[in-house]
Image: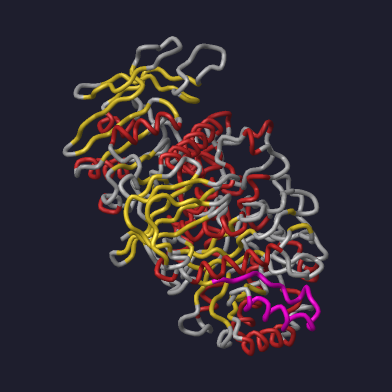
Amino acid sequence: MQKQKYQWNTMTLGVCYYPEHWPKAMWRDDLRRMKAAGISTVRIAEFAWAVFEPKENEFSFDFFDEFLALCAEEGIKVIFGTPTATPPAWLTEKYPEVLNALRDGTLLRHGARRHYNYNSPVYRRLSARIVTRLAQHYGRHPAIVGWQLDNEFNCETDEFYSDADHTAFREYAKQKYGTIDALNEAWGTVFWSETYTDWRQIHCPRPVLNGGHNPHLLLDYTRFISESCLSFAKMQADILRAYIKPGDFITTNGLFGNLDNHRLLNEVLDVYTYDSYPDFAFGLDRDPRTSNDLNDRKWSRHLIETRSICPHFGIMEQQSGGGGWINRMEMPAPRPGQLALWAMQSVAQGADYLSFFRWRTCAFGTEMYWHGILDYDNRDNRKLAEVKEFGKLLRTLDPVCGAEHVAAFALLKDYDNEWDARLDALHRRIARHSEAEIFAASELTHTPYDVVYIDDGTEADEIRKYPVVFYPHPVIMNEKRAAMLRCYVEGGGTLVVGCRAGLKDMRGQAYMLPQPGVLQELTGTDVRDFTFVSPGEDADPEASVWNDVLTPLEGTAVLDRYKGSYYAGEASLTEKKTGQGRTIHLGSAFSRNTVRKLFRYTGIVDLFADVVAAPEGVELVMRRKNGRTFIFALNFQTTAQQIALKKPATLLYTGEPAEGTYELPPFGTAVFEIK
C-alpha cells in the first residue's frame, strides 16, 4: 500500500522560476505578476549548485538569501530544490570518477545535466555536503514549504556504466546470490559459455555483438539501477529531515524508467510530483492526424500511473509553452485553450498542486526554445491571460481537493514485468500494444480505471474493491502472486489476463511447465501452440500481435474462437469459474474492440451512464469526497462538444445550476457537482 505522508488541503497554483537567469531588478515585478495570476508558490534552485558552491568547499548563500527574503516579503511560498542534477565544472574536472559513462566506457562530460552516477563515493560525499549546507542554512526559512530532491531521477538516461557502477553492481550481485555458482544458475550462464568463475568477472552490461546481452543479467542490472537511485535519494532525504521545519514536505519530480517509484514514495518522499508535457503528442516528428493513440489525451495514462504511486499528487512542471531544446523535442505552441485544458486534465486525475513550467522563456542555454508563460520580451500575452483564467477556475475547485478517483476496474502491474518488457522485445511489443488499447477503450467508453502495482507482499484485499482487474501480460509470475490472484477470484473478483501469461519465473527464465505456468489452475487453459500474428496471412483482425492457441481444460468455457490462420476455430477467449469469481483468458494481445466487448461482458462499461452522456471526444473523470460527487468533462476536440447531464448539477466554476444539454467549447472544460 502507498504511504503518502503529505497532502495539500487547498488547490494550489505554482510556477518554476530561476532567479539566477534574470537581473535582480526584475524579481519583485515577477513575483507581483505571479500573484496577480493566482500563483502562490515557486520552485527554485534545482540547477544552482555552482551558485551555492562556486569553488570547492567555498559556500555562498547571499544570492538566494536575497531572493527568499523577497519571496517572504511578497507572500510567495517556495519549494527548494537540491542541486545534485548539475554538478559544477570544478567538481567534474577534479573528480572525473563522478561522471556517468556510456556502455563502452566513454565518460559523459560536463556541459549538459544528469551526467553524474549514483554510486561514486566521491559524488555521494560531495552531494551530501551541499545538501547538508543548504539544509542547515535554509531548513527553517519561513518562505520554504517543501523540498525537491535533485531533478527528474533517471531522466536523460536510466543506465549507468561508470567504474563505480561496475563495482557496486558486483557487490549487489554478491549480496543477492551469495555464491558465484548460484549466480551462474540464476543467469543461465551455461548458455554460450558465459559461465563466471570469479566475482571480478561480474560487470554491468558491456558492449556485445548486436546487443544480444544475457537477459537475466540485464533484469538484475535494472533492479540494481533502481536500488542505486533509491539509495541516493534516501541519503538526501535523511539529511533534510534533520534540519527542515515540521510540516515541510520532501518530494521529487518526474516519472522515469528503471526506478521503483512506489518504493521511492514509501521509503523516501512525503508526496510525489509529476512533470506533464502533453504537447509531445504534437511534436514535429509525428502527424497527430494519423495517430491512433489519442494524442494529448493519452497523457491521462501517465497521470493515472502517477496516481498509482501517490493518490493526491502534485504537478511540478505543467506545460505552458511549445518548443523544445536546441537539438530536439520540437513542439508547436499550445493552441488557445490547450494550456488550461492540459492543466485541468492533471487536476481531474488527482493533482491538488499544479506548477507551470516556466515563468519566462530563458534567453540562453539548451532550453532557450522551451517556452514558458512569458516570452523573451516579457510582455503580457495570451498564455498569461489563460493562466490567470485557469487560476480563477482552480480556486473554485477546493471542494474537490483530496477527493478520491472513482474507477470501474483496475489495471494490475508490477515492476518485474515492467522492466522485463523494456528488455524483452517480444514482451515489449505485446505489452505496449495492450496497454495503449486498454487505455483507448477505457477513454472512448468512459470506463475509467486505476493502476495498481503488486508485489510478493500484496494481499487480495488490496484489490478487492475492484470487481474486475486486468493483468494484461504477467509474463513473469510466481506462486505467491498466483495465490493472491486466486484468493481475489475466489472472493468474487473477475481476473482478465492475456497471452504469454506465466511464462517466466522471477529470474526471467522460462518455466518448463505447460503455459500459462503457475496460473494454469486459475485460467483452466493449456497453451500447446503459439505464434506472432503474421502480416502475410488472413488473420483475425482482433487477435492482435501474438496468439496463444488455448485448449480449455475441464470446467473451462470457450467464449470466442480464432477466425483466421491455421488455428481458425480454436479457442481464443475462455472463462474459468473459481469460488465466487472467474478468470477470463485472452490468447492474444488486447485490441480496443476486444476490450469494449470485455467491458460489456463483465458489466463495467460506462461508469457514468446514469449521470452524464458524452461523445467519445470528451474525457470524463469522477471524483468523490465526503459523500459529494464531482464530474470533470474535458473536450480534447477542436470543435464544440455537447454533453447531456442526466441529474441536476452545479457548475463549480460559477456556482450556477446545470441540467440537460451543456456545450463545451473547443478545448473547453467543466467541473460539475452532481446533486
Where is 473 relative to 314, above or below? above
Where is 442 relative to 90, above or below? above
- Image quadrant in which the C terminus is located: bottom left
Percent of width and height locating residue 577: 20, 32
Residue placed at 42% from the left, 53% from the top? 621
Percent of width and height locating residue 391: 56, 69
Q: Is residue 250 visible?
A: yes
Q: Nearer the viewer, residue 95 or 617?
A: 617
Magenta-highlighted stretch: main secondary structure? helix
Residue 19 within the segment the image draws in magenta: yes
| Picture quadrant where residue 628 is located | bottom left
Residue placed at 68% from the left, 72% from the top? 17
Q: Nearer the viewer, residue 223 or 334?
A: 334
Q: Nearer the viewer, residue 145 or 73?
A: 73
Q: Which residues are magenta?
A: 13-36
Where is 471 relative to 650, above or below? above
* Outermost left residue: 579
- Image quadrant in which the N terminus is located: bottom left
Using residue 60 as the reference point, say whether residue 637 is left or right of it.
left
